[in-house]
Amino acid sequence: MRKYDSYKPTKIEFLDEIPEHWEEKRMRFVGYMYGGLSGKSAADFNQSNHEENKYFIPFTNIANNFRINPENLQTVVIGENENQNTVHKGDLFFLMSSENYDDVGKSAVLIDELPETYLNSFCKGFRITKENIIPEFLNYQLHSKQHRHNLLTGANGFTRINLKIDKVIDLLTALPSPGEQTAIANYLDHKTAELDELIADKKRLLELYEEEKSAIINQAVTKGLNSNVPMKNSGIEWLGEIPDHWEVKRFKYYFNLITEKVEEDLPKIGLENIESKSGKFIETDTDFAGQGVRFRPKDILFGKLRPYLAKVWLSNFDGQAVGDFYVFRSKQEVYPEFAKFRILDSSFIEVTNSSTYGSKMPRVSWEFIADLPIAFPEIQEQQSIARHIETKCSVIVAKKAKTEKLIELLTEYRTALISEVVTGKVKVIE
């Protein structure tokens, strides 16, 4: 790739120049915006077999895709005389509101012919009216770093970040000829597909690393390290066979439930501070309200809500657990590091998950956990098992970190490539 022969200054912020023959146009002069569904109630959506059902594009179809996925549509009841906007092939769609800056202002393009289809109420559609504008090119340009910056300078809000329509329609674009737009879009289709496949492969590798880690933990905390040791039937369905010398006792024999309320000004942590499955502590700026349960170093915090049962953390400082945690303190017969891995094991998570109750916020009860039979070896063997797991998993964690860094670099390169090509910094056609 090389640069164009000549360039000229541009009024587009965060961009110094564009190719000499490219045209600057505001979005308002190449098309118009229209609204999504209005006046609908929750009862109108996803009513199976309703005779007035019509398709609509959900919020997630725009948030998760560069192009609208025609297989990911939902239904809404639309009466015969309702005045709602239908979508057309070539339309672009914007997320006008989101909880984070990564999603707000994101666009997706519709390249397929759809049956009568509408747009969800949290988004806006943009219909191109000029014949010399290629929708796929314009969508790529809207994903460039420069245009994203220019859109987001007007976004604001507290719990949700909101984007005003005027910010979109006043956005300056840089447009080459229709032939160049098509060639650029085709080039980026090819290159981003290659990068997306690479990124997907690396993400699958991360999943395999996670499975390997889970297998190491599961094998060690349920069968021990010696594959030749005699086994016995535990008599407990979820435990299955265990080493012959391991003892089965109820959970409450090994742990105390801590319910002490905090009187001191100690650090507060919530569920968002614990990474699921890894037991990793994550620093956040969240200001948790209310009084928490006192925990000490070597206590185990266990997320008791169904979606967060795999949030297990072995504490290393004094603090207070706010919200939906149980705080377990190991008794003398238990090595805390082993206990953390035993509670993180998938078999423990599954059996506790099977007992959760409640509809809105299902959780596991202490009474169920307290009476749950569980098998532990003697403390010296617990220490050996914990050291084995930590050694094996540290290798996997290092591999994961390298892979995550590679995904980050590939993603950054993808964004940079789009930005350079759609702003004319490099030329992709002769």
Image (cartoon, rainbow, N blue to C red):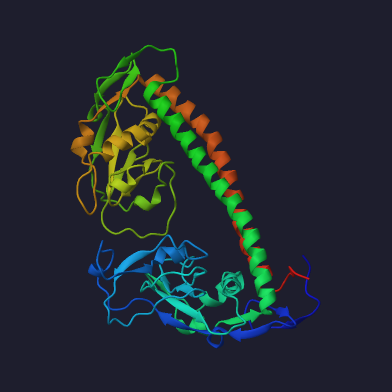
From the viewer's perspective, tell me whether residue 10 is left or right of residue 233. right
What is the quadrant of residue 303 in the picture?
A: top left
Residue farthest toward the right in the current orientation of the protein: 5
Q: Quadrant of the C terminus?
A: bottom right
The foreground one among 50 and 159 is 50
Q: Quadrant of the N terminus?
A: bottom right
From the viewer's perspective, tell me whether residue 136 is left or right of residue 118. right
Say whether residue 267 is visible: no
The foreground one among 296 and 63 is 63
Q: Residue at x 43, y 64 (%)?
A: 61
The foreground one among 194 and 150 is 194
On the image, the x and y values in percent for residue 262 come to: 26, 49
Q: Residue at x 75, y 82 (%)?
A: 20
From the viewer's perspective, tell me whether residue 139 is left or right of residue 255. right
On the image, the x and y values in percent for residue 224 come to: 41, 21
What is the quadrant of residue 380 in the picture?
A: top left
The foreground one among 69 and 261 is 69
On the image, the x and y values in percent for residue 85 come to: 38, 79
Q: Residue at x 54, y 36 (%)?
A: 396
Say whether residue 36 is visible: yes
Tell me: residue 76, above or below residue 166. above
Tell me: residue 239, above or below residue 136. above
On the image, the x and y values in percent for residue 227 come to: 44, 16
